[in-house]
Image: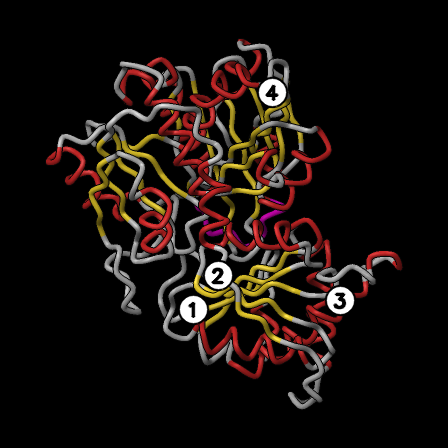
C-alpha cells in the first residue's frame, strides 16, 4: 500500500497501482478499529453505535473496493450497513439516520476514472481528516502485514434512497415554479440521485451525461471552466432558467445562469445570504477566506454574523458547529447546512436554488447581477520550490496592507486584497486576487506575478 494515498482530508490514489482490494481491506480494518475506539461506555450498548455505514460511487472498481473494505471492518468484529450506490452526502445522512459510529464512502470525487479512494466520517458524520484521525488510521493500516482474520461482523444491505429523498425534499419551501433546469451529472452520482429525488417535482430537467459506463465524457470537476462548455451551450439552446453541473460524487456543484454565464460559488453564497437570514435572523454564516468581499458585505447588510474560515471541509464544518451557523459556502462548490448535520449537499443546494427561483420573477442573471461588483482573478496555481519563503517575500512586498495568516497569507488594502496559500498535496502556491476595479486587479496581479512568476495550468 502506497502511503502517498493518505491526503489531508481523505484517501485517494490510482487503482490498482496505489490502491487495490488489499489496501481497502487494511483501511477498512484500521477505520473500524479507530472509530469504535472512540465510543464511550454507554454508547457501546446502543444497537447501531458499533456499526459502520459503507457506500460507493459509480466507478467500475468501486463495488469491489467497497466489498474488500467491508471485509476488513468485519474482521475486527464491526457490523456493517452497506447502503450501496450513493452520492457522498447520503453517507452523512445514513450515519445520522441509522445512528452508527461512522461511515465510509468509496469515491475519488472529481478525479479521473482510474482513481479511487475513501471519504471517512465519524460520529454524527464529523469529517475524519489528517488532524482528526486519518494519521492514526494510516498508522494502523500500514502496520497490518496481511489481510486475514476471522469474519466476526455482519453485513446488512439497506436502500435508503426513499428516506434520503424525504430528507432532501423537506427543505422545499412550498409551491415550485415550473422551472426548466439543465443538469450535467458528469457521468457521476447525480445521474442516479437527481431522477430519484426531483423527477416528480413538476420541473423540467434536461439531462446531460447521466449514464454510468465507467468513463467520463469530461473530467467530473465543475470548477474547470472547459468542463462546463456542453452545459452552457445546452442552457442557452433550451432557453432554460438555470444550469447545474455536479462533480463525480455529487457533493459539489456549479451554477450557470440562463445566458450561459458561470456563477462563482462565492456569489452563490452571497445570493443565499438574505434567503437564509430571513429564515433565521441574526444567524452566523461561514465562508472560506478565498471568497469575494461581497459575501461579508451581504451578511452584514442583512443582519447576519460573518464567520471567515480557512479552506477545507473539515474546518468549515467545525466552525459551522461551533458558531451554530445556519449555512456555509466554499469557493470549491461545497455548501453546508446546519439542518443537514452541518454537512454539505449538492442535492439540498439544488432544492434551495429551486426555492429562490420559485419565489421571484427575476431571472438567475438578474438575481446575481448586483453581486458582480468586484473583479476576481480566480484561483491561480504557481509552481514554487520554497513555498514558505515565497509567502514571506510577498508579505514583505505588500507589508503596508492588513495582514493575517489564517490560511497562508492574506493581505487587504482599501481597493484590493489577495490570499496566497500552499497546496496540501502539490508543489504549488494557490493565489486569489480581488479588486474593486478591473484596472486595479490587472495592476496588482502583475506586481504579484513579477515575484512568483507565471501561473501553471489548472
Helix, strand or loop at label 3? It is helix
Say which of 439 and 256 sits in front: 256
Say whether residue 386 is magenta: yes
Sequence-wise, the earlier of marks 2 and 1 is 1
Mark 4 or mark 3, whichever is nearer to me: 3
Q: CA distance from mark 3 to mark 1?
A: 25 Å
Sequence-wise, the earlier of marks 4 and 3 is 3
Q: CA distance from mark 4 to mark 3?
A: 45 Å
Q: CA distance from mark 3 to mark 2?
A: 26 Å
Q: CA distance from mark 2 to mark 1?
A: 26 Å
Q: Is residue 457 visible?
A: no
> Which residue range is magenta in the image?
381-389
Sequence-wise, the earlier of marks 3 and 1 is 3
How crowded pointer 1 is (Cα within 10 Å; few <14, some 14-19, many 20+) is rated as many
Q: Which residue is identified by label 1?
A: 115
Q: Which residue is identified by label 3?
A: 34
Q: Is residue 212 visible?
A: yes
The residue under the point 30% across, 51% down is: 185
Q: On the picture, is 65 further left or further right than 102?
A: left
The mark found on residue 159 in the picture is: 2
Q: Which residue is identified by label 4?
A: 401
The residue under the point 18% across, 36% down is: 235
Mark 3 or mark 2, whichever is nearer to me: 2
Above or below 263: residue 312: below
Amino acid at each position: 500500500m502506497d502511503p502517498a494515498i493518505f491526503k489531508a482530508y481523505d484517501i485517494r490514489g490510482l487503482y490498482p497501482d496505489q490502491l487495490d482490494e488489499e489496501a481497502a481491506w487494511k483501511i477498512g480494518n484500521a477505520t473500524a478499529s479507530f472509530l469504535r475506539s472512540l465510543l464511550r461506555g454507554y454508547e457501546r450498548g446502543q444497537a447501531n453505535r458499533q456499526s459502520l455505514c459503507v457506500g460507493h460511487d459509480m466507478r467500475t472498481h468501486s463495488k469491489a473496493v467497497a466489498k474488500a473494505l467491508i471485509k476488513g471492518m468485519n474482521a475486527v468484529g464491526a457490523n456493517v450497513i452497506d447502503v450501496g450506490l450513493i452520492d457522498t452526502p447520503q453517507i452523512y445522512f445514513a450515519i445520522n439516520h441509522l445512528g452508527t459510529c461512522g461511515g465510509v464512502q468509496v469515491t475519488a470525487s472529481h478525479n479521473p476514472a482510474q482513481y479511487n479512494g475513501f471519504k471517512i466520517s465519524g460520529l454524527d458524520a464529523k469529517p475524519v481528516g489528517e488532524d482528526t484521525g486519518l494519521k492514526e488510521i494510516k498508522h494502523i493500516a500500514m502496520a497490518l502485514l496481511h489481510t486475514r482474520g476471522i469474519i466476526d461482523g455482519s453485513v446488512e444491505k439497506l436502500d435508503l434512497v426513499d428516506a434520503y429523498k424525504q430528507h432532501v425534499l423537506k427543505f422545499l419551501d412550498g409551491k415550485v415554479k415550473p422551472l426548466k433546469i439543465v443538469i450535467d451529472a458528469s457521468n457521476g452520482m447525480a445521474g442516479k440521485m437527481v431522477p430519484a429525488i426531483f423527477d416528480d417535482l413538476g420541473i423540467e430537467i434536461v439531462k446531460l451525461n447521466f449514464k454510468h459506463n465507467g468513463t467520463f465524457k469530461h473530467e467530473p470537476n465543475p470548477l474547470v471552466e472547459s468542463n462546463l462548455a456542453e452545459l452552457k451551450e445546452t442552457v442557452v439552446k433550451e432557453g432554460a432558467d438555470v444550469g447545474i453541473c455536479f462533480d463525480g460524487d455529487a457533493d459539489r456543484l456549479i451554477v450557470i445562469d440562463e445566458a450561459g454565464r458561470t456563477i462563482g460559488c462565492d456569489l452563490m453564497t452571497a445570493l443565499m445570504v438574505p434567503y437564509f437570514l430571513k429564515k433565521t435572523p441574526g444567524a452566523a454564516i461561514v465562508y472560506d477566506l478565498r471568497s469575494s468581499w461581497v459575501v461579508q458585505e451581504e451578511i452584514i447588510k442583512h443582519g447576519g454574523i460573518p464567520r471567515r474560515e480557512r479552506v477545507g471541509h473539515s474546518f468549515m464544518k467545525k466552525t459551522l458547529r461551533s458558531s451554530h451557523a445556519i449555512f456555509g459556502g466554499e469557493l470549491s462548490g461545497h455548501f453546508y447546512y446546519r439542518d443537514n448535520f452541518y454537512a454539505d449537499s449538492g442535492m439540498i443546494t439544488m432544492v434551495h436554488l429551486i426555492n429562490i427561483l420559485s419565489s421571484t420573477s427575476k431571472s438567475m442573471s438578474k438575481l446575481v447581477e448586483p453581486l458582480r461588483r468586484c473583479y476576481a482573478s480566480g484561483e491561480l496555481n504557481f509552481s514554487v520550490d520554497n513555498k514558505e519563503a515565497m509567502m514571506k517575500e510577498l508579505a514583505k512586498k505588500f507589508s503596508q496592507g492588513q495582514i493575517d495568516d489564517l490560511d497562508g497569507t492574506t493581505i487587504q488594502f482599501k481597493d484590493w486584497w489577495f490570499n496566497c496559500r500552499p497546496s496540501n498535496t502539490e508543489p504549488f502556491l494557490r493565489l486569489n486576487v480581488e479588486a474593486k476595479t478591473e484596472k486595479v486587479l490587472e495592476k496588482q496581479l502583475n506586481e504579484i506575478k513579477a515575484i512568483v512568476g507565471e501561473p501553471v495550468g489548472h
